[in-house]
Image: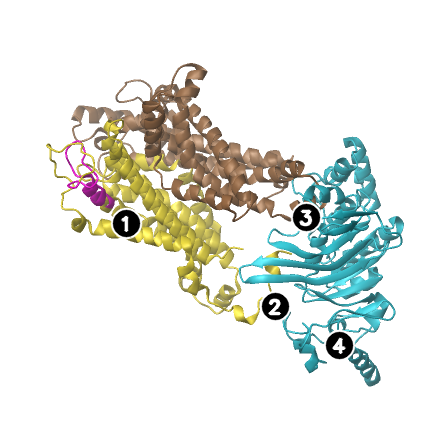
Chain colours: A cyan, B yellow, C brown
């Protein structure tokens, strides 16, 4: 079905076999006292149906902003300046808030990093979970309450009938995160956006939550877009991953491919600086330098000031994200150097 | 993640915050207003030739004219002159009056915050007791007991006003004393007085100074109110409060006698509030 | 239940404050060197009058026993005899209390009506035009003497336009509502700058909170979002702000009663000051202190009722 929208033809209705969520060349800018911050500078990615996609990067790389732009919950100073966000073929960017509100919940949901501050402190937990079905699915109060208890059980909250009436401050961090997940699931969305939901939790709880998410993903076929700076988490949960740096995607591909054979020096650097329990490396090697300014980023490739493989042509032009065989993509002009470096490291051991 | 967190600090943004103070519109306009008022009040003899108490029964209740810039009151006294000299009385008392509560409150607040324990408990109980009385009730009662006049005003304002400073300083010290540089000083064996005086107070006193700006406004209001009631600056010495009381009898016919002194208070209050706001923005940059 | 024990603990904390209030009130007259009786009665006091006061108050006895006498009388509801009217100070004060209570409540209601919408307007778009416009209000308002505002309101709406009576309390509920409107408006205007400032700050805090983002991401429509999430959380600091400033409101009634000749305890106090009727002044000061303490207690109770986090120790 095609219809005419203000920006051109707007395709409505799901594209069969296509990705459930597609972001095309998204640009988000923030007006700050010091200048215009290009927080998200031309990001494109896809979330296939039923899959978990990871979005990794350091703090300040723009990954959270990307998620918020998708859902339309950017802070007031930030704005989507161009690009498309296609959910089942419908572009969310030009939609007014009233239309967005009908999508949020039933189609698209989000989980946040800090469950303590993300839950309404004066509202009972059960009511917060039941609110979505009441508003979006027309459930009566009792039916919504039943559904809430059901969801609480599904996410592993013990004694759900009693804990329905509890307040957020009476729960531990891990339990609160489960509540958030229950809220996200309440209207059976197609995609759940996850903004570092495990970062604020202990490692053991982290593991539980990740397993829970993986299970729910499998059981209900919901897709995940999982933002984190923690590589092992992505390795555990996701099928494909996109790496963000300085507001752009620098590498994309299946998790096994990207983590074993990275095709971008930044990815390589991240892997080397991340503690990996499975493989004992000789030493952790942090990436030298600091993140780029998003107001006036370095010319050419944004990573080149910190890159060990940088060549003169890296400063000339911004390298585009190029497709490679095997469903991978990279934004490095000299990506073979990563391979060589890994082989050299292997040989040295 | 807030937008602010995403603006990475690149090396070129090392501009000193102090360089910005003259760019604050609130601060600058406030300072301008107060500077003008202070000038007018201090240079009163230059700006008017009339004695504020000189009566001229041939020229009563006149409107503004060439001889009398703002007219005269029912005893023929020049309003402009009374306004200027009244301002002298009110502002001089207010500016002095703000110092005593500041000092007393800072000392007591520091003791409470730094030493905690009994000192904290007793001082905070004292705070609760003083605060239990409405501001004006206590001031008026004290002035009643002590008799009218400037001295009583100082005492009354000090007894009632130290509380806010004590609270602010105590709060700031509770936070500051956990900072590492304090722990370092303590383990280095510095005496408590030295730590409080040299290290803690200078960092902590900025909040009190910001508050002092709004406190001066409160003090001016208190002085003016007391004088209006007849408990403050006694006639014939002019002050904005008793000028308003004086004009009350002619409210319907010559409302300017009441309005003008009030406006003087409002404008002075505006200037001081602007300075306070500007300072607060400057010393604690917002988002 | 956690909340009850919270309230009970607050009640207990009140006891030392109440005691302190009585001590201050008692000591007021002993602050000055010299004979308290002479201070109270003034320079023209006759030796006879001084002697009577000495006997009645036991001014020759040690301070502590004087204090006990004071407390003992207090607990029996005896605040002394008015030196001017010759009747019980307590009865005088009680008779005048309703007018002041009317003024306090009416003013609080008007202050809320003025401040809450303005604060909401300002907080709805931070640093927008409306925000800056609203922020000018406290700048001007803080510097306005309450009595001056009262006089101007009197001039315009009572003396010139004749909409409201100039002074007085009026009779019957309708009469009270009409007569007390200008005075209450005056107090409300005096209080609003402070309340608007604090309300705006706390509303901005709530609006910027993460749970509001969560609610938005759930697709909760505007009105429900506002009432269930924003307002429900914003009332908590609002109640606290109002409670903190209630002392200011109560104090404001003092001057306003004078300007509008309302027969309340504030007016009584000022008259008694000029007539040097010390027992009445002392009595009114005490009553004011008690009023503030009670209102603070009410605020704490309301806060405990509204915020479920308060059940556990703060």
Is residue B108 at all visible to an observer of this figure? no
Q: Is residue A121 left or right of residue B265?
A: right
Q: Is residue C124 left or right of residue B264?
A: right
Q: Is residue C95 above or below residue C255?
A: above
Chain of the residue that carries numbered disc 2 in the rendered image? A
Chain of the residue that carries numbered disc 3 in the rendered image? A
The extreme bottom residue here reads: A348
Q: Which numbered disc flags the more N-terminal residue, 3 or 2?
A: 3
Q: Which numbered disc flags the more N-terminal residue, 3 or 4?
A: 3
Give the Cα separation between the discs numbered 3 and 2: 29 Å
According to the picture, the residue beneath numbered tag 4 turns out to be A333
User: Which image quadrant for residue B223?
Assistant: top left
Magenta residue check for B71: yes
Residue C11 location (% of width, % of height)? 52, 34
Question: Is A283 in front, or is B163?
Answer: A283
Q: Are marks 3 and 1 on the same chain?
A: no
- Which residues are drawn in magenta? B66-87
Give the Cα separation between the discs numbered 3 and 1: 50 Å
Give the Cα separation between the discs numbered 3 and 4: 41 Å
Which element carries disc 3, helix, strand or loop? helix
Residue A227 location (% of width, % of height)? 74, 59
Q: Find residue A293 and name its label.
A: 2
Q: Find residue B37 and name its label.
A: 1
Q: Are marks 3 and 4 in contact (CB under 8 Å)?
A: no
Q: Is residue C171 left or right of residue A264?
A: left
Residue at the spot 72% in from the left edge and 76% down from the top edge: A285
User: Nearer the observer, disc 3 or disc 2?
Assistant: 2
Residue at the spot 46% in from the left edge and 55% down from the top edge: B281
């Amino acid at each position: 079905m095609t219809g005419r929208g203000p920006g051109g033809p707007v395709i409505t209705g799901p594209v069969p076999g296509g990705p459930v969520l597609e972001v095309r060349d998204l640009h988000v800018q923030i007006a700050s006292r010091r200048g215009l911050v290009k927080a998200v500078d031309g990001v494109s990615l896809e979330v296939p149906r039923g899959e978990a996609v990871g979005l990794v990067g350091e703090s300040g790389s723009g990954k959270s902003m990307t998620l918020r732009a998708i859902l339309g919950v950017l802070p007031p100073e930030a704005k989507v300046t161009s690009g498309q966000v296609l959910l089942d073929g419908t572009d969310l960017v030009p939609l007014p808030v009233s239309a967005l509100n009908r999508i949020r919940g039933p189609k698209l949901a989000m989980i946040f990093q800090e469950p303590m501050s993300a839950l309404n402190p004066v509202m009972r937990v059960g009511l917060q979970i039941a609110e979505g079905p009441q508003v979006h699915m027309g459930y009566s109060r009792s039916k919504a309450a039943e559904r809430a208890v059901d969801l609480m059980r599904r996410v592993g909250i013990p004694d759900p009938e009693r804990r329905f009436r509890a307040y957020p401050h009476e729960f531990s961090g891990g339990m609160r995160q489960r509540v958030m997940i229950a809220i996200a699931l309440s209207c059976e969305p197609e995609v759940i956006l996850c903004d570092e939901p495990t970062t604020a939790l202990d490692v053991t709880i982290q593991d539980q939550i990740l397993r829970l998410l993986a299970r729910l993903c499998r059981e209900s076929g919901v897709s995940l877009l999982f933002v984190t700076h923690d590589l092992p988490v992505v390795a555990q949960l996701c099928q494909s991953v996109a790496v963000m740096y300085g507001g752009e995607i620098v590498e994309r591909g299946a998790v096994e491919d990207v983590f074993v054979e990275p095709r971008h020096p930044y990815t390589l650097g991240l892997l080397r600086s991340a503690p990996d329990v499975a493989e004992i490396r000789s030493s952790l090697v942090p990436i030298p330098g600091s993140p780029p300014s998003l107001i006036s980023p370095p010319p050419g490739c944004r990573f080149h000031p910190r890159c060990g493989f940088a060549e003169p042509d890296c400063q000339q032009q911004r390298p585009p994200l190029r497709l490679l065989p095997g469903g991978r993509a990279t934004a490095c002009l000299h990506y073979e150097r990563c391979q060589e470096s890994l082989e050299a490291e292997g040989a040295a051991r | 993640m807030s937008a602010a967190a995403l603006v990475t600090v690149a090396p070129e943004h090392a501009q000193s915050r102090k360089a910005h103070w003259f760019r604050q519109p609130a601060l600058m306009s406030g300072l301008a207003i107060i500077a003008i008022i202070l000038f007018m009040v201090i240079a009163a003899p230059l700006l008017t030739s009339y004695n504020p108490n000189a009566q001229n029964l041939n020229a009563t209740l006149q409107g503004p004219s060439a001889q009398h810039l703002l007219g005269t009151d029912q005893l023929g006294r020049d309003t402009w002159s009374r306004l200027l000299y009244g301002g002298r009385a009110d502002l001089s008392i207010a500016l002095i009056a703000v110092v005593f509560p500041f000092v007393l409150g800072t000392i007591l607040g520091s003791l409470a915050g730094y030493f905690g324990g009994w000192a904290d408990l007793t001082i905070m109980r004292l705070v609760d007791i003083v605060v239990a009385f409405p501001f004006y009730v206590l001031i008026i009662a004290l002035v009643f007991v002590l008799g009218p006049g400037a001295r009583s005003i100082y005492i009354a304002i000090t007894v009632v006003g130290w509380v806010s400073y004590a609270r602010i300083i105590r709060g700031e010290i509770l936070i500051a004393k956990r900072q590492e540089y304090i722990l370092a000083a303590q383990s280095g064996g510095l005496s408590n007085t030295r730590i409080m005086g040299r290290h803690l107070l200078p960092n902590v006193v900025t909040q009190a100074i910001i508050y002092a700006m709004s406190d001066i406004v409160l003090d001016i209001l208190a002085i003016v109110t007391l004088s209006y009631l007849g408990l403050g600056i006694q006639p014939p010495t002019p002050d904005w409060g008793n000028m308003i009381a004086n004009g009350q009898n002619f409210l319907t016919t010559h409302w300017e006698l009441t309005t003008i002194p009030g406006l003087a208070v409002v404008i002075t209050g505006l200037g001081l509030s602007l300075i306070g706001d500007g300072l607060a923005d400057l010393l604690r940059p917002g988002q | 239940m956690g909340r009850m024990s919270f309230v009970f603990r607050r009640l207990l904390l009140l006891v030392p404050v109440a005691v302190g209030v009585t001590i201050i009130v008692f000591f007021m007259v002993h602050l000055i060197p010299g004979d308290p009786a002479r201070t109270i009665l003034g320079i023209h006091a006759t030796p006879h009058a001084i002697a009577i006061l000495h006997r009645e108050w036991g001014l020759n006895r040690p301070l502590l026993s004087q204090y006990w006498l004071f407390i003992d009388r207090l607990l029996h509801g005896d605040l002394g005899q008015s030196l001017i009217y010759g009747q019980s100070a307590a009865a005088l004060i009680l008779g005048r209390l309703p007018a002041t209570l009317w003024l306090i409540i009416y003013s609080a209601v008007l202050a809320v009506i003025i401040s809450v919408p303005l604060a909401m307007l300002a907080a709805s778009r931070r640093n927008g035009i409306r925000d800056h416009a609203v922020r000018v209000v406290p700048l001007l308002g803080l510097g306005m003497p309450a009595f001056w505002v009262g006089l101007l309101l009197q001039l315009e709406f009572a003396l010139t336009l004749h909409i409201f009576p100039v002074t007085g309390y009026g009779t019957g509920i309708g009469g009270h509502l009409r007569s007390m409107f200008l005075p209450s408006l005056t107090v409300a205007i005096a209080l609003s700058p402070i309340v608007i400032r604090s309300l705006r700050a706390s509303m901005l805090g709530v609006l910027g909170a993460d749970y509001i983002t969560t609610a938005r991401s759930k697709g909760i429509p505007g009105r429900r979002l506002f009432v269930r999430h924003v307002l429900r959380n914003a009332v908590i600091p609002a109640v606290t702000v109002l409670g903190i400033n209630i002392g200011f409101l109560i104090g404001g009634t003092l001057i306003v009663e004078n300007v509008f000749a309302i027969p309340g305890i504030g007016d009584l106090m000022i008259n008694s000051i000029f007539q040097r009727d010390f027992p009445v002044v002392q009595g009114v000061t005490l009553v004011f202190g008690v009023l503030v303490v009670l209102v603070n207690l009410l605020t704490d109770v309301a806060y405990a009722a509204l915020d479920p986090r308060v059940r556990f120790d703060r």
